Amino acid sequence: MIRHAIAFSLMASVAQAQSVKLEGDEISVLLTGNTAVGVWGGASYRQFFGADGVTIYAQNGARSTRGEWRVENDEYQSIWPNDTDWEGWFVMEYAGQWFWVSKTTPPTPFDVLEGQQLVAQ
């Protein structure tokens, strides 16, 4: 299970109900080869993170977008077609829930599904 790979580093903080900012290697373990599922800007999404650095973002009723992703400076970073710069997000865990966090947006929750699951089953 995905959570077991980083559970030891999070156990003490979870027990105290504190938020935990994941480090780079923990972000890589959580995301690589898996799919994040959540709501962004009011729309449900699924995003797959390939081991080759390719990411695919899918929303119902819209064409999927292919971008690139990486982990640098203890943050998830992505770049999409027509972007000029990489954009970074911290990944936080609080009480068993994952969150995207940046300086410009409130924490946004997401779940992680094992493998590539861009289509809801």
Image: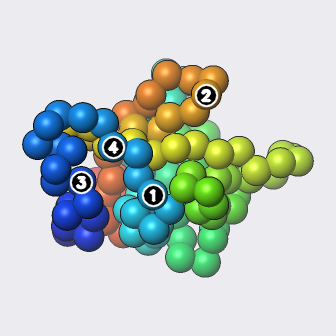
* Numbered disc 3: secondary structure: helix
Q: Which residue is mark 2?
A: 103
Please report whichever mark, 4 or 2, sits nearer to the chain's N-terminal start.
4
Most extreme residue toward the left is 15
Q: What is the three-letter code of the residue carrying label 3?
A: Leu
Report how far apart the C-alphas of labels 4 and 2 lie in the structure: 16 Å
Q: What is the three-letter code of the residue carrying label 1?
A: Glu
Q: Which residue is mark 4?
A: 20
The N terminus sits in image quarter: bottom left
**Label 2 Cα crowd, 10 Å radius (few <14 / some 14-19 / many 20+):** few
User: Residue 89 got which mark?
Assistant: none
Q: Do callouts 1 and 4 mark residues in contact (Cβ within 8 Å)?
A: no
Residue at (50% x, 34% y) in the render: 101
Any part of residue 103 in sight:
yes
Quadrant of residue 61 within the rendered picture: top right
Q: Which residue is mark 3?
A: 10
* Numbered disc 4: secondary structure: strand
Report how far apart the C-alphas of labels 2 and 1 lie in the structure: 17 Å
Relative depth, front residue between 100 and 24: 24
